């Protein structure tokens, strides 16, 4: 475990820093998957809003 000695003999522990790496741009396949998931999520949320609306109207 890395540590430093400070004045007065105190030890100070530091967390390990993770390796830093450059993010890669998404591929065409990943972009298509993100678009499909976005469409599915939009339809799901829209359907839930419609169900809530019709349930509240019928009461």
Image (tube, rainbow, N blue to C red):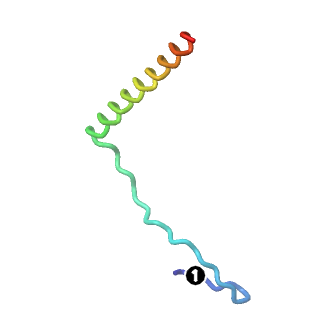
Residue sitting farthest toward the bottom: 9
Is 51 rendered above or below residue 58? below
Q: Residues within 10 Å of mark 1 (few under 14, many from 20)?
A: few
Q: How many marks?
A: 1
Q: Position of residue 7 (x, y in %)?
A: 72, 86
Quarter occupied by residue 12: bottom right
Q: Position of residue 48 (x, y in %)?
A: 47, 23
- Closer to the camera, 31 or 38? 38
Is 59 rendered above or below residue 46? above
Mark 1 highlights which residue?
Answer: 3
- Closer to the camera, 56 or 12? 56
Does dot 1 land on a helix, a strand or a loop?
A: strand
- Closer to the camera, 19 or 40? 40
Seen at 37% across and 27% down, the residue is 39
Residue sitting farthest toward the front: 59
Seen at 26% across and 39% down, the residue is 29
Judged left or right of residue 15, residue 40 is left
Quarter occupied by residue 36: top left
Residue sitting farthest toward the top: 58
Judged left or right of residue 18, residue 24 is left
Seen at 57% across and 12% down, the residue is 59
Judged left or right of residue 27, residue 54 is right
Quarter occupied by residue 35: top left
Residue sitting farthest toward the left: 29
Seen at 39% across and 31% down, the residue is 38
Is 57 rendered above or below residue 34? above
Q: Position of residue 34 (x, y in %)?
A: 35, 36
């Amino acid at each position: 475990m890395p540590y430093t000695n400070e004045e007065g003999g105190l030890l100070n522990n530091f967390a390990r820093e993770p390796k830093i790496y450059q993010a890669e741009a998404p591929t065409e396949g990943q972009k298509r998957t993100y678009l499909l998931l976005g469409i599915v999520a939009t339809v799901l949320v829209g359907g839930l809003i419609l169900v809530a609306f019709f349930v509240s109207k019928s009461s």
